[in-house]
Amino acid sequence: KVNKGMMWQGNQQQQIILVFGGLCLAATVAVSLPNPYHLVNKFKPNLKLNKIKNLLSRIPRIGGTKVGKPLVREGRCIYLDYAATCPIYPEVTKAMIPYLQRYWGNPSSGHVYGVKAANGVARARLEIAKLLDADISEIIFCSCGSEVDNWAITGALQNERNHVITTAIEHPAILACTDHLQAIGIANISIIGCDDLGRVSPQTIADAVIPGKTAIVSVMLANNEIGAIQDITTIVRLVKAKDPQILVHTDAAQAIGKIPVNVQNLGVDLLTLVGHKIGAPKGCAVLYIRKGVNLTKFLHGGGQEFNRRAGTESVPLIVAMGEAARIWNQEGIQIAQHSTRMRDRLAARLRDLLSPSGLPLRVNGPLAAGLFDAALPNVLSIAVGGISASSILATLREDLAASAAAACHSDSVASPVLKAIHLSPSYASGTFRLSVGRHTTQKEIDQAADLLASAILQQVWHSPPPLKPKSKVQQP
């Protein structure tokens, strides 16, 4: 309590310290809030989500970027398998925990527990819509990429429109679905090939259209094995010119965050986004459905997700995916640049270590022709003729995490993607898919290249055992 008329007479330095301390406290409180929507609900509970976008963007967040900073590793194993799954970002884990411990209500419930959960879902939807330049009503949460891809294909089929066009280099979630639909007589499928670099011709896609019969065209934006980026914008333009009623879908699971993905520029009707490819846990994905598109329901039940997809939302996973989207909104360009440097350093170092041996060595995909703009910045598909990539990675499983893109069941059976680019069996069996990301370090790249080159030479020339890292990579 102070007397009337009494005022603090501190000197200027004390005033500055007090004001600065107050600002730091306010910023810390704002950052620590599990969900800024709590502020909105308290003061203006009837605001629509689109009207509070600017308010949320003004809430300060403290902490520098973590691009290029290593994560805690499993033993000594270096992780170069970001295309298989991205490590869960530390900020994502932190954002998710409150919705496991405190805000666990059903987001469809009207009481305070449900409102808290619903706010978490709403904020995540907003961040993902921002990432894609979409409206929040176009973002539909699902369980995984396979569900999304299957829904996009089957939901597009209508009575007379039962023709589906896709490519030979799609994810199995698309190709297995179309194979099944054709096998049971529900759909007719046209599979379009690609060139030796993994590029699909937009004109060839358009030529396969049957006006009045084709229901959907599905072409992935970027390939998960060789990193080839497709010209989706041109595909949409050519297909719609022949029949505006045809839906165009793209699986952008590998592309989101690595390259700009703007649904307005792409012009697609449907798009697949997967949480665990962008730093969130597995178990959550998004189907973007453009306004006005009529897609038959895949799951029936409650009226969740704007009455498009039934099932109680997994709030913690959705919140995590939204936080990952926020990171990519802020750091996407920086992460892509860092990934490019790591990928190129890895390719150069492997080339330097293996070229003197005289082993046949090649890069797969657009990078083989120097088409850097047509390739993902984080994927390197490199092949050594006459070796077994899967056997080498098996010997390195404690030291290096990567994928052998050559085999489905055995070294003699190449993946559909490598077959589609007409890679010889010798190179196919010796293909490694090495993928980097936000937390890959230069030291890890150098150690991984040394390990891989040593193991390759050991298999070919029976040289000494593979090199081990001289010291563990510094942990954060």
Image (cartoon, grey):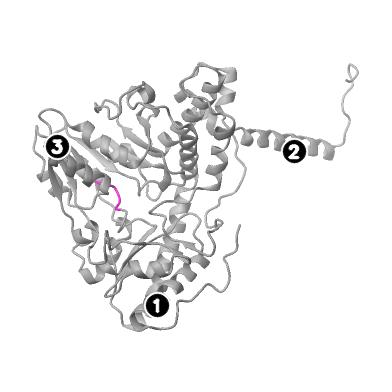
Image location of residue 195, percent across then percent down: 18, 59
Quadrant location of the C terminus in the rendered image: bottom right
Upstream in sequence: badge 2 or badge 1: 2
Residue 19 lies within the magenta run:
no
Secondary-structure class at tag 2:
helix
What is the three-letter code of the residue carrying label 1? Asp
Quadrant position of residue 19: top right
Residue 268 visible, this orientation: no
Tag 2: Cα neighbours inside 10 Å, few (<14), some, or many (≥20)? few
Q: Which residues are magenta?
A: 219-223
Quadrant location of the N terminus in the rendered image: top right
Residue pictured at 54% horizontal, 43% vertical: 93
- The residue tagged 2 is 20
- Residue 115 sits above or below residue 164 on the image: above
| Label disc, if present, on residue 241 of the rendered structure | 3
| Label disc, if present, on residue 352 of the rendered structure | 1
Please give left or right for residue 416 compared with residue 134 in the image.
Answer: left
Image location of residue 400, percent across then percent down: 45, 65
What is the three-letter code of the residue carrying label 2? Phe
Upstream in sequence: badge 2 or badge 3: 2
Disc 2 from disc 3: Cα separation:
60 Å
Secondary-structure class at tag 1:
helix
